[in-house]
Image (cartoon, rainbow, N blue to C red):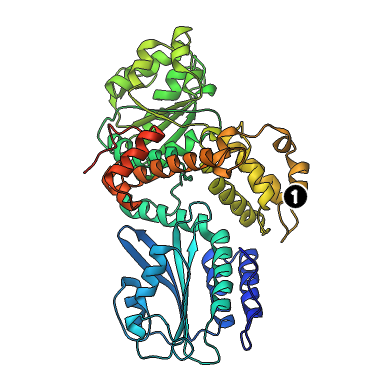
């Protein structure tokens, strides 16, 4: 975007520049994002000389639902409510807000005393007003997350095209600072409201079609499946560092079992001699060293969730101990003969190829058969580079808060390098890298190439991930980059609309024939979940 023009006489753009400093100042004092955004918005409104100023969040795009989070100046409750709901009311222009959110383009209503062709918004007809309105966009997907509305009635303070350029620049900066976390916070809040999960419920971050599909299938299939009595086991597959433990915590947090225990077990630590005792418990004196009664993992997790990580590390003998409880939902503690029923949702995870483990005799076929039906496979990060930008921003800001050290973020060059890196250790590797960057960065400085070279030189020397090319539009022809973006966009919209083709194509403004032509050309399946309703 070109540099904004010089300010007209009487405009205090020093306040607007100070608005960005307010963001960094409040964040550095650990005042929280909402306080930083409020302080910045107030400074920006002063800089523009706004008599009425409103910041609205897009809570839902379809149907459009707005919520005012900051209101300044001479705004009545009736006007604020009208702006949220798109209803006509004198003195402000809800229709302009709706138009800017829908189009994603900033707009100016010039004072009719200065412009013969001033906009004819009904709510301002006959009044001497000028209005600025700009969207705050998601920096990755360009979706509108929020909207800024500024209005005044002074002739000398009337807004013009120069003001519009400055507001657009400010809104872009706010989007880059807050956009990713803002959108994810809204998504997770909606899920918490639906599932009744607490504030500490984990998040599954990412914008790729794979991650969107994962979030959807967890809520549509896996969470309902584990809420029944004696549920079927769930298997989570994925390379190291992909977040298999996160999936287990997510399933627990958003299911009706969230008020009962989540017991986490690393099966690599379970020896053959102690397997029965660790899993099922024991009575005092049942063997040497059994000094007290112990419930075991299954009884400790009764009513809740038992997460068995690294399940392929168990020996065939230890696997045999688990086979019966997975089939009958009963345990027999060591030193007892009476069976005890347990109601446990069992989640198992591994980074091994279990079919290969069965062929090599390391995994019992009957044991594998007992939990292979409900399986979730998490792709490695190199296969879903669209998830990397929000993850980078999330972990950078997490570690900035943890270490009380705000930075200016990643330079554009570094951001592109990190997105194109293949991250062999996946999300865990990326999170560790962000921690290093923040620890070694100078407060208030950029995370630049020199810092990356000191902390993680292999990022600069490794071959770029070819799958990240379309995301960065680098190394591809124009047609290749456009085709990759079209495919990701359509898959993303299908996921947003639960596989409903009609809803997805309508959200893109395409006819039925055109949409299906895109799907055919891009190799997107039209069967199964992709349905026209």
User: Which residue lies most toward the left here?
Assistant: 533
From the top left corner, tell me how far across and down residue 479 is, in percent.
Answer: 51, 40
From the top left corner, tell me how far across and down residue 451 is, in percent.
Answer: 76, 47
Residue appearing at x 35%, y 81% in the figure: 79
Q: How many marks?
A: 1
From the top left corner, tell me how far across and down residue 454 is, in percent.
Answer: 78, 43
In the picture, measured across the screen, residue 81 lies left or right of residue 398, that is left
Neighbour tally class for label 1: few under 14, some 14-19, many 20 plus, Cα within 10 Å:
few
- Figure quadrant of residue 44: bottom right
Give SS at disc 1.
Answer: helix
Q: State which quarter of the image contains the C terminus.
A: top left
Q: State which quarter of the image contains the N terminus.
A: bottom right
229 or 97: which is nearer to us? Answer: 97
Residue appearing at x 25%, y 35% in the figure: 228
Residue appearing at x 35%, y 74% in the figure: 95
47 or 247: which is nearer to us? Answer: 47
476 or 470: which is nearer to us? Answer: 476
In the picture, measured across the screen, residue 451 lies left or right of residue 229, that is right
Residue appearing at x 56%, y 50% in the figure: 394
Q: Can I make out residue 216 in this image?
A: yes
From the top left corner, tell me how far across and down residue 165 is, in percent.
Answer: 57, 72
20 or 375: which is nearer to us? Answer: 20
Q: Which residue is mark 1?
A: 440
User: Which residue lies most toward the front here?
Assistant: 116
| Vertical arrangement, residue 78 with respect to residue 197, above or below | below
Q: Can I make out residue 283 in this image?
A: no
């Amino acid at each position: 975007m070109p540099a904004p023009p010089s300010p007209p006489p009487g405009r205090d753009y020093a306040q607007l520049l100070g608005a960005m400093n307010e963001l960094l100042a409040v964040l550095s004092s650990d005042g929280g994002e909402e306080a930083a955004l409020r302080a910045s918005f107030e400074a920006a409104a002063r800089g523009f000389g706004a008599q009425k100023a409103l910041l609205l969040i897009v809570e839902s795009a379809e149907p459009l639902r707005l919520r005012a989070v900051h209101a300044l100046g001479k705004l009545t409750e009736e006007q604020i409510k009208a702006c949220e709901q798109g209803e006509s009311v004198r003195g402000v222009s809800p229709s302009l807000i709706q138009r800017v959110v829908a189009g994603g383009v900033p707009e100016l209503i010039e004072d009719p005393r200065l412009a013969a062709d001033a906009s004819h918004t009904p709510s301002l007809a006959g009044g001497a007003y000028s209005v600025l309105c700009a969207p705050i966009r998601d920096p990755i997907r360009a979706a509108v997350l929020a909207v800024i509305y500024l209005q005044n009635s002074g002739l000398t303070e009337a807004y013009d095209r120069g003001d519009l350029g400055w507001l657009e620049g400010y809104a872009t900066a706010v989007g880059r600072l807050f956009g990713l976390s803002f959108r994810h916070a809204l998504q997770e809040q909606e899920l918490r409201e639906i599932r009744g999960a607490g504030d500490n419920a984990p998040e599954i971050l990412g914008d790729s079609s794979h991650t969107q599909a994962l979030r959807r299938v967890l809520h549509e299939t896996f969470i309902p499946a584990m809420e029944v009595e004696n549920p079927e086991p769930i298997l989570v597959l994925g390379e190291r560092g992909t977040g298999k433990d996160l999936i287990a915590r997510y399933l627990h947090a958003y299911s009706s079992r969230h008020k009962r225990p989540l017991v986490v077990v690393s099966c690599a630590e379970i020896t053959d001699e102690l397997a029965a005792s660790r899993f099922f418990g024991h009575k005092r004196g049942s063997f040497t060293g059994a000094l007290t009664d112990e419930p075991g993992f299954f009884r400790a997790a009764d009513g809740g969730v038992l997460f068995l990580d690294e399940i392929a590390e168990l020996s065939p003998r230890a696997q045999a101990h688990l086979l019966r409880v997975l089939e009958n939902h009963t345990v027999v503690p060591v030193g007892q003969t009476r069976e005890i029923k347990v109601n446990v949702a069992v989640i198992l995870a591994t980074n091994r190829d279990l079919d290969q483990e069965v062929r090599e005799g390391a995994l019992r076929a009957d044991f594998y058969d007992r939990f292979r039906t409900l399986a979730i496979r998490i792709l490695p990060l190199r296969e879903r580079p669209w998830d990397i930008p929000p993850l980078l921003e999330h972990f950078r800001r997490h570690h900035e808060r943890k270490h009380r050290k705000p930075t200016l973020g990643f330079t554009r060059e570094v951001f592109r390098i990190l997105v194109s890196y293949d991250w062999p250790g996946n999300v865990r590797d990326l999170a560790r890298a962000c921690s290093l960057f923040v620890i070694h960065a100078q407060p208030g400085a950029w995370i630049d190439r020199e810092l990356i070279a000191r902390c993680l030189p292999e990022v600069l020397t490794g071959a770029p991930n070819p799958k990240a090319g379309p995301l960065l539009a680098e190394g591809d022809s124009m047609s290749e980059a456009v085709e990759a973006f079209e495919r990701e966009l359509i898959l993303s919209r299908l996921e947003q609309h639960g596989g409903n083709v009609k809803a997805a194509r309508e959200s893109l403004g395409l006819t039925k024939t055109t949409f299906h032509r895109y799907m055919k050309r891009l190799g997107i399946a039209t069967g199964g979940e992709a349905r026209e309703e």
